[in-house]
Image (cartoon, helix red, strand yellow):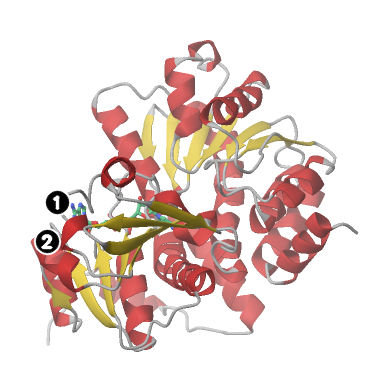
Amino acid sequence: MDSGELKMGWARQYMPVLAEIRKRFEKEQPLAGATVGMALHVEAKTAVLVETMAAGGAEVHITGCNPLSTQDDVAQALGRVPGVHCYATRGCDIEEYYAAMDKVLDASPNVTIDDGMDLIHRIHTLRRDLLGSVIGGCEETTTGIQRLRAMADEGALEFPVLAVNDTPMKRSFDNIHGTGESALSSIMITTNTLIGGKWFVVAGYGYCGRGLARMAHGLGAKVIVTEVDPRRALEAHMDGYQVMTMKEAAAIGEIFVTTTGNTSIITGEHFPLMRNGAILSNAGHFNVEIDIPWLEEHAETKETRDSIDTYLVNGNRISVLAEGRLVNLATTKGMGHPVEVMDLSFALQALCTEYMYKNGGSLKSGVYDVPYEIDAKVAYLKLASLGVSIDELTEEQKIYLHSWNAGT
Ligand SMILES: NC(=O)c1ccc[n+]([C@@H]2O[C@H](COP(=O)([O-])OP(=O)(O)OC[C@H]3O[C@@H](n4cnc5c(N)ncnc54)[C@H](O)[C@@H]3O)[C@@H](O)[C@H]2O)c1
């Protein structure tokens, strides 16, 4: 076995939910005849999802959704799986990135799976000839859903898409635990610096941000949160963190992680205020949260080591990890979310793809919630794999919960 196959074998061991789904897919072949086009982070856990789809009868064409997150050995091993075509390479330039996406689209997918909406964007702009053949899509991340909802609001979205990111079984585990643990572990292994006792700034107290804050606090960091939403700022305050503006935090922070899904969070207004040795990273989807073009233009010097660019600003050294791209995936040592977390997220993707292939034709264009039955199915499969049983609602309780007459 080569290194890509070994990585896939390792991931498979810790993905019991997908394994159960695969058993059923092999028997029932629910994706027979489907061509699935995917743009996801191409690494071992994704490869297990792709194998599962192929085992269910799909022909899968896949590329990356970030130029720095592909693991080439896994991409090569995946390309050898029957029914799978993989076009992703690590470190590709922007032209190569979109050329690989076009190869996926040349296969005329009838279901798309995106992480950031790049395939759907391309289909609706440069590849409109494909609109007739796509039954529907699935979207993995917050930023992709934001873009899809903006499209739907303008009446520009021309097929149905399931908002996989927004379902509780995704957000509560992938965004909170997955991003929290993997961003921190990537920062720690890339920089070999201590978290305990440091001022740790989290920009954005959403699902990802609260996971990061909680875990950094658990390691002994003094956590500062910046927000623009007053309710979330108040939650952060009551969860025990310091809340302040980025301008205030810039002068105090020692490690920064942006996780807003927004643009221009740490900019030329903030860099000159920072302490010597500040470490900056981004866990939001696109590399627009830290203004790296400003640093490239204004820094006195730049020194580059493995996944770390150190800029000298006002005589202070400011280091940016992974060029401001997803820190948990885009550093050379970043492994992405823990395997067990992606077992849940990708189990949702497998069942949502099956649902969309079967039902997408009868749905109008728009962004849809994941059906409750799919969410609950994944939770039950995971609980079963853990050997955990839970109570069931009795008939009396069901009636009570739906009545408006019962009182004291
Ligand atoms: N690194 C990963 O593997 C990973 C995993 C899941 C999601 N994501 C990405 O992380 C980002 C956040 O996802 P989420 O689910 O936490 O979203 P979310 O919507 O729950 O949280 C984002 C938070 O950022 C805040 N915010 C927006 N603009 C801000 C600003 N200027 N300053 C401070 N705060 C601001 C919002 O008010 C919100 O509370 C998205 O881009 C998403 O795609 C990354």
- For label 2, count other residues whose C-alpha is less than 10 Å away and answer few (under 14), some (14-19) or many (20+): some
Q: In this rendering, does residue 278 appear at all?
A: yes
Q: Is residue 291 left or right of residue 171?
A: left
- Labelled pair 2, 1 in contact (Cβ < 8 Å): yes
Mark 2: secondary structure: helix
3D distance between C-alphas at marks 2 and 1: 8 Å
Using the image, determine if residue 45 lies above or below residue 253. Answer: above
Q: Quadrant of residue 311?
A: bottom left
- For label 1, count other residues whose C-alpha is less than 10 Å away and answer few (under 14), some (14-19) or many (20+): few
Residue at the far right in the pictured view:
1
Counting from the top left corner in percent of width and height, residue 217 is at 32, 84
Counting from the top left corner in percent of width and height, residue 396 is at 35, 79
Going 59% across and 28% down the picture, which residue do you hit? 101
The residue beneath circle 2 is: 247
Using the image, determine if residue 200 lies above or below residue 61. Answer: below
The residue beneath circle 1 is: 269
Going 14% across and 81% down the picture, which residue do you hit? 238
Q: Quadrant of the N terminus?
A: bottom right
Counting from the top left corner in percent of width and height, residue 121 is at 43, 26
Q: Is residue 28 left or right of residue 1?
A: left
Closer to us: 391 or 298:
298
Q: Quadrant of the C terminus?
A: bottom left
Amino acid type indicated by mark 2: Lys
Amino acid type indicated by mark 1: Glu
